[in-house]
Every structure is written in structure tokens, then in C-alpha cells.
């Protein structure tokens, strides 16, 4: 009998019944598997329990730590090494074997990047752009940056598109995982609409500075070049479809490159809209009161101004910290 891999796998979920079964089946070789579920209504937790995972309910109250950081600090992890897997990701046997061998000989780094090979329109993509994330971590030396995104449009309970930070050198595993979302295509676009709102708000407000500070100098330079490009959507399409040979993946490769380009077009458009709205607000505040066309006179006008001031005041209410319960 093969010994279980001495790693704690963590899957964060919310309404992932379509994906969680194959995800957990692939995690069977790992010694400990948590599904941290945000009160799903589609039976995700039941599927996870049936697969043998430990299900931990989680409710986020709008403050740091967000979900993944909370898992590092609060779950009863048996192992120092943690593997973060999204519900729409699958760890193939080759990757599981590589992690097992790494643990057997002793890791030399504080964390390891893992590539993700996309499955799009039912077809595994061999070429095109790929995702790479710091998924395997020594929890004693790991954490997550805080990029001041709690009030950003599209912000949600899980850390956004940024990497954890580790105190120590970082390596990279050779074998990829599969990124295979089995939900309807509409869910893909809904999710990326939210991502685009979040990223546009952070780029406009400088919230990505904390994230950029964790990048290597080379990655910061590449991001600066990309941020200066006037046609990011077109650049992303050409990078994935031409430079990264996505054209060799046929129709699926074309549509995947186009979907990625559309996402970056959305981010740029939202940034421009936000800037235009901010400029319009500045011009309105500078306009004399008799040009506002409120129709208010005397005391009514003062009350109108007070009402406007109240409308502009930020919500001062404070929410409690993240909550989680362990199964009895």
C-alpha cells in the first residue's frame, strides 16, 4: 500500500457541485483534504463529505484575513506543507507523484509554482497562455499580501489574482495541473466580469502596489511594459494565439485567446469609465450652486446640500472578523 502524501490539500468552494467531485477524486493520494465551503446551496458540501474530505463551513464578514489566509492560520493542519487547489482544478497522477517524491527527499524551497493547463470547450489546450500560481507552500513561511481591496467593486471572500508571499526561495514543479471548469460558459463570463471590476478598481486606486512589491524585478518590468500598452486586449490575443502558438489548438485555442483578450479589454474599459465618472464628479462639485438646477431656495437649498453631503459620506459601519466552524 502506497503511503499517503504528507501534504494538507485545501479547496475553497462556493457552489462548486459541478466541479468538486473530479477535484477531490484526484486528491485521494494526499493525507489530508479540507473543503472550506461558504454555505453552498447546490450540494457542494454533501459531495465533498461523500468523497471523504473534511468540510469546514466558512462565512466571511468583509474583513481581512480573507479565505485562503484564514485557512493557513485556522485550519487544524496536520502537515507543514499545504497545497491550494481550486475546485475547477485537477491534480493529475504525474503531479501528485512529483509532489510525493519532493516530500520524500525534502523540499529545498519555501514554496513551489505549479503551471495550469487549461481545458476549454472540452478540449485540453497544449499551447497558448498558461496560468502559473504559487500553490504548494510551507505554511510556516507563507502569507498573503493585503492590497486594500475590501471596498473595491467585485471584491469577494477569496484572495484575488495575486500570489502568496513566502519567506525564502521559490521553486517550480515540472508537472502541470488541469484547469477544467465544468460549469456553463455563462458562469465563466460572470466570474470574469467580477474579476474585471476588481482589477480595474485596484489599478485605478493604486491597490496593486502591495502585490507588485512581492514580484521579482523582472516581473515588475514586464508588468510596467504591459501596463503602458495602448491596446492590451490585442496584445494579449497576439501573445496567446500567435506567440504562444494557440493557433495550433484549433477552434478552442482561438476562442480561449479571444476570451482572455476580452477580459483585458473589459479591465481597460472599466478604468476609462471610472476616470470619466470621477472627472464628471469633480466638474459638478466645482459648478456654482445656481447652475445645478436643484430648484431649491433658502433653507431648502441648505437642506439639499446637507443631503448631498450625507449621500457622499462613506459607510462607517464595521463588520466582524471572518468566522469559521470546525465539524463536530
Image: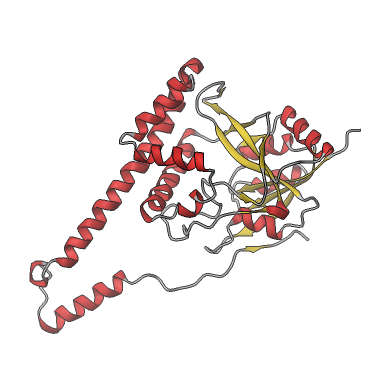
Q: Is residue 15 left or right of residue 283?
A: right
Q: Nearer the viewer, residue 302 or 234?
A: 234
**Identity of the residue drawn at 72% across and 31% down:** 95
**Identity of the residue drawn at 43% across and 60% down:** 151
Residue 101 appears in the figure: yes
The quarter of the image holding the C terminus is bottom right
Query: Residue lying furthest right in this view?
Result: 1
Q: In this rendering, is residue 130 above or below 203?
A: above
Q: In this rendering, is residue 188 above or below 71?
A: above
Q: Nearer the viewer, residue 291 or 168?
A: 168
**Identity of the residue drawn at 57% across and 21% down:** 126
Q: Is residue 206 left or right of residue 51?
A: left
Query: Residue 305: x percent and y percent?
Result: 20, 76
Residue 38 appears in the figure: no
Q: In this rendering, is residue 218 above or below 305?
A: above
Q: Nearer the viewer, residue 36 or 69?
A: 69
Query: Residue lying furthest bottom in this view?
Result: 299
Query: Residue 229: x percent and y percent?
Result: 34, 36
Query: Residue 29: x percent and y percent?
Result: 80, 36
Q: Quadrant of residue 9?
A: top right
Query: Residue lying furthest front in this view?
Result: 217
Q: In this rendering, is residue 170 above or below 291?
A: above
The quarter of the image holding the N terminus is top right
Q: Quadrant of residue 170?
A: top right
Q: Is residue 229 left or right of residue 132?
A: left
**Identity of the residue drawn at 56% across and 70% down:** 320
| Colour treatment of the image | secondary structure
Query: Residue 239: x percent and y percent?
Result: 43, 26
Amino acid at each position: 500500500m502506497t503511503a499517503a502524501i504528507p501534504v494538507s490539500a485545501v479547496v475553497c468552494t462556493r457552489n462548486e457541485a459541478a466541479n468538486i467531485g473530479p477535484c477531490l477524486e484526484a486528491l485521494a493520494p494526499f493525507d489530508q483534504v479540507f473543503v472550506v465551503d461558504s454555505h453552498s446551496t447546490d450540494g457542494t458540501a454533501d459531495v465533498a463529505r461523500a468523497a471523504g474530505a473534511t468540510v469546514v463551513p466558512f462565512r466571511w464578514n468583509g474583513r481581512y484575513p480573507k479565505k485562503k489566509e484564514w485557512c493557513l492560520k485556522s485550519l487544524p493542519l496536520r502537515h507543514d506543507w499545504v497545497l491550494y487547489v481550486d475546485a475547477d482544478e485537477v491534480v493529475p497522477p504525474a503531479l501528485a507523484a512529483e509532489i510525493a517524491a519532493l516530500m520524500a527527499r525534502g523540499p529545498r524551497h519555501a514554496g513551489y509554482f505549479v503551471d495550469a493547463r487549461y481545458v476549454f470547450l472540452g478540449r485540453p489546450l497544449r499551447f497558448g497562455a498558461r496560468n502559473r500560481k504559487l500553490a504548494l507552500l510551507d505554511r510556516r513561511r507563507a502569507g498573503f499580501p493585503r492590497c486594500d481591496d475590501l471596498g473595491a467593486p467585485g471584491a469577494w471572500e477569496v484572495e484575488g489574482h495575486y500570489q502568496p508571499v513566502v519567506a525564502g526561495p521559490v521553486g517550480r514543479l515540472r508537472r502541470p495541473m488541469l484547469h477544467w471548469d465544468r460549469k456553463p460558459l455563462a458562469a465563466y463570463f460572470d466570474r470574469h466580469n467580477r474579476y474585471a471590476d476588481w482589477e480595474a478598481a485596484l489599478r485605478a486606486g493604486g491597490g496593486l502596489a502591495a502585490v507588485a512589491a512581492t514580484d521579482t524585478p523582472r516581473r515588475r518590468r514586464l508588468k510596467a511594459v504591459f501596463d503602458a500598452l495602448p491596446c492590451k486586449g490585442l496584445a494579449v490575443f497576439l501573445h496567446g494565439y500567435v506567440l504562444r502558438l494557440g493557433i495550433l489548438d484549433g477552434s478552442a485555442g482561438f476562442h480561449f485567446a479571444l476570451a482572455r483578450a476580452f477580459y483585458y479589454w473589459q479591465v481597460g474599459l472599466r478604468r476609462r469609465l471610472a476616470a470619466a465618472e470621477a472627472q464628471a464628479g469633480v466638474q459638478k462639485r466645482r459648478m456654482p450652486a445656481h447652475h445645478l438646477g436643484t430648484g431649491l431656495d433658502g433653507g431648502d437649498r441648505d437642506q439639499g446640500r446637507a443631503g448631498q453631503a450625507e449621500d457622499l459620506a462613506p459607510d462607517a459601519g464595521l463588520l466582524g472578523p471572518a468566522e469559521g466552524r470546525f465539524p463536530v
